[in-house]
Amino acid sequence: MTELTNLTVAEIRDGVAAGTFSAREVASAFNAAVEAGRALNAYIVETPELALAAADAADAARASGDLKPLSGVPIGMKDLFCTAGVQTTAASHILEGFTPPYESTVSGKLWAAGAGMLGKLNLDQFAMGSSNETSAFGKVISPWRDASGKDLAPGGSSGGSSSAISARLCPAATGTDTGGSIRQPAAFTGISGIKPTYGRCSRWGIVAFASSLDQAGAMARTVKDNAILLETMAGFDAKDSTSLDLPVPQWEANLSSDLRGKKIGIPKEYRPDGLNAEIAALWDQGIAWLKDAGAEVVEVSLPHTQYALPTYYIIAPAEASSNLARYDGVRYGQRVLPDGAGLQDMYAATRAAGFGDEVKRRIMIGTYVLSAGYYDAYYTQACKVRTLISRDFEAAWETCDLLLTPTAPSAAFPLGEKQEDPLAMYLNDVFTVPASLAGLPAMAVPGALNSAGLPLGLQIIGKALDEQGVLNAALALEERAGFTARPEKWW
Ligand code: GLN
């Protein structure tokens, strides 16, 4: 008997269409897995009834010959996407109990394509973090374990998505990526995930963190599944002024791991002294795999790479401080109104009680770098450096088509290990933020297990709008890596 929860999105879609199993059987199997997987804390809200309703619609659609692209596919939805009638919290107490009357464009497209929702996935609070420990709804635990037996971080901020996919609590999920939140959790849990070009997916209805960086994307176990999901998620939306008015390519149909004629750049600045030896070895292996797929490999230089992290940690908090000003106790979620309090007191009390420590840290940094006295020294300067980082990529594209790098500087670390040290936590993003600052498509794909038995990932970065090139190179890696490891069930 097929283990239904081990099927990929493509296998579910095709199996439902062929009548190999019903969509209801698939949804029921995943609903049971979600329930049995509660120890991972991957879901904030479970919506088994919505998964079943979509499944029944898919089974009816099959009977009437009316199947849609994702009919019968149940997915997890990061709890940063507003979902009509279903609590949306961004993993913050300040939004606890907030039930949006509207649907985000991206989630709406997925439902319209026939997908069903298993639940809302946990995340770092307001998507700020790299370990899913800043959630007001508790840490997410990775299903992976090493010999220490300690609970490991699933990465962040899309840690509920990564944990749930690798534990087979959903076949695929949405993520959002501001500085690496799709790619780093994918790397930590042995799955793949793609952040498309900035503007490909509408940001409308996604709780905003840093608007010039935020992008929705897909997370799943295979490159093909990512292509399938992203094809539905992407597309122009008049409700988002930064949405790109371009047709959505047929990424799935055009998947090809034949890389002949492609040049892959290896940025030398991504190999700092002290780079983890197993990650360096996997990177070398990745180079060999891409050559085997027909690509030519060249060394390139992205000279401003070392400034990407500090630049990101000025720009992202600056935008966050502005975006999060809306949580004032008046319009959304929580309100704290002490006896006899005035309006200002209510704002302060609500925000003090509602936001977590990391969110407060970002708001304070952001407010500081935007303040009259320091704006030029920090924010303006960071914007200039951001332009230099974009120009580095432009220059690299003169000699190559795509870049290959590691995804994260380490494998998953134990929960609690970096929680008290924000700078150590921010270093997780060193390989992912440059593509975010430049708005480029980038994808993480699992490469190997390290000596402790934990997954390590590789990253492909592409030119703006070249998701196809990114997916194809990732597919070439996937085929050669043959990564089939999955966490042993302990939960
Ligand atoms: N880890 C990064 C941060 O904390 C990136 C988060 C994200 O991409 N949403 O800001």
Image (spheres, rainbow, N blue to C red):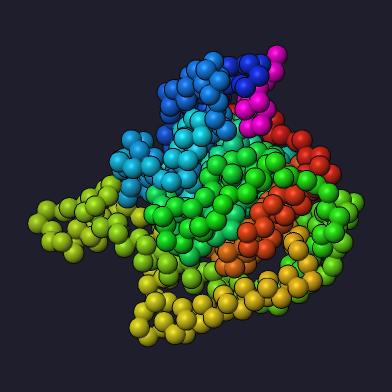
Asked if one can make out residue 32 in the rendered structure from this viewpoint, the answer is: no
Residue 14 magenta: yes
- Between 60 and 288, the residue placed more toward the observer is 60
At horizontal 25% and vertical 58% (from top left) the residue drawn is 328
- Which residue occupies the extreme left position in the image? 340
Q: Main secondary structure of the magenta part?
A: helix
Q: Is residue 224 left or right of residue 438?
A: right
71, above or below 325, in the image: above
- Between 138 and 52, the residue placed more toward the observer is 52
Query: How far from the left and from the top, in percent, is residue 276?
Result: 77, 59
At horizontal 51% and vertical 62% (from top left) the residue drawn is 213
Query: How far from the left and from the top, in percent, is residue 429?
Result: 61, 61
Asked if one can make out residue 301 in the rendered structure from this viewpoint, the answer is: yes
Q: Is residue 378 left or right of residue 187?
A: left
145, above or below 265, in the image: above
Q: Which residues are magenta?
A: 1-15
